[in-house]
Amino acid sequence: MKIAVRYYTKTGNTKRMAEAVAQAVGVEAQPITTPVTEKVDILFLGNSYYAFSIDPEVRDFIKSLDKEKVGRIVNFGSAAMLNSTYKKVKAEADKVGIAMDPREFHCKGEFKAFHKGRPNEVDLKEVAEFAKSFL
């Protein structure tokens, strides 16, 4: 099974999670500025809410994906105030014809005075275990 990990982060929280996912599945985590050029069965996509939606860069990244190269997207991320970005990511994936796995990982993320230290070591361990469940 071929796996890729891409992420978008403004605070570094999602990057830390992406690195835990990547280590768990034996690949390198890369930012969404790195295109997916090889065929992959699973694309782990890390993102978060910014101004109550996914960032336009995440939308553009999903639009750039080739449905012949990406089998399915697995969503993961953190956010201080809102929950999962799954519905927003799925809406974009549907537009380009890429399936979304119904499973995802979401935890609280630190932002200003909210959720200090999150994602923490427990969160990183849990996201790694989540990723391993796909192997």
Image (tube, rainbow, N blue to C red):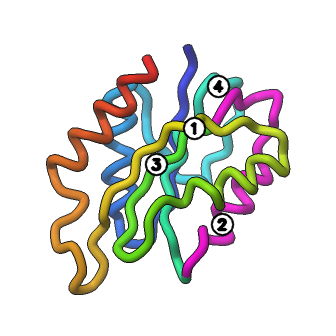
Which mark, residue 76?
A: 3
- Residue 106: percent from left, percent from top: 39, 53
Q: What residue type is labelled 1?
A: Pro
Which mark, residue 57?
A: 2
- Circle 1: is it few (<14), some (14-19), or many (20+) Cα within 10 Å? few
- Circle 4: is it few (<14), some (14-19), or many (20+) Cα within 10 Å? some
Check if residue 59 falls in the magenta segment. Answer: yes
Q: Are marks 4 and 1 in contact (CB under 8 Å)?
A: no
User: Which residue corresponds to the image point at 32% horizontal and 28% vertical from the top-left?
Assistant: 24
Disc nearer the start of the sequence (1/3): 3
Q: As rendered, which of 85 and 8 lies closer to the eye? A: 85
Question: With 103 as the anchor, is 92 left or right in this view?
Answer: right
Name the element at disc 1.
strand
Q: Are marks 3 and 2 in contact (CB under 8 Å)?
A: no
Looking at the rendering, the stretch of residues picked out in magenta corresponds to 52-72
Which mark, residue 40?
A: 4
Q: Is residue 67 above or below residue 79?
A: above
Q: Is residue 70 above or below residue 60?
A: above
Measured Cα–Cα span from mark 4 to mark 3 = 17 Å
- Circle 3: is it few (<14), some (14-19), or many (20+) Cα within 10 Å? many
Q: Which amino acid does label 2 sit on?
A: Glu
Q: As rendered, which of 133 and 62 lies closer to the eye? A: 133
Which mark, residue 130?
A: none
Disc nearer the start of the sequence (3/2): 2
Question: With 111 as the anchor, is 121 left or right in this view?
Answer: left
Q: What residue type is labelled 4?
A: Val
User: Which residue corresponds to the image point at 41% horizontal and 46% vertical from the top-left?
Assistant: 105
Residue beneath disc 1: 102
Name the element at disc 2.
helix
Quadrant of the rendered structure where residue 74 is? top right
Measured Cα–Cα span from mark 3 to mark 2 = 16 Å
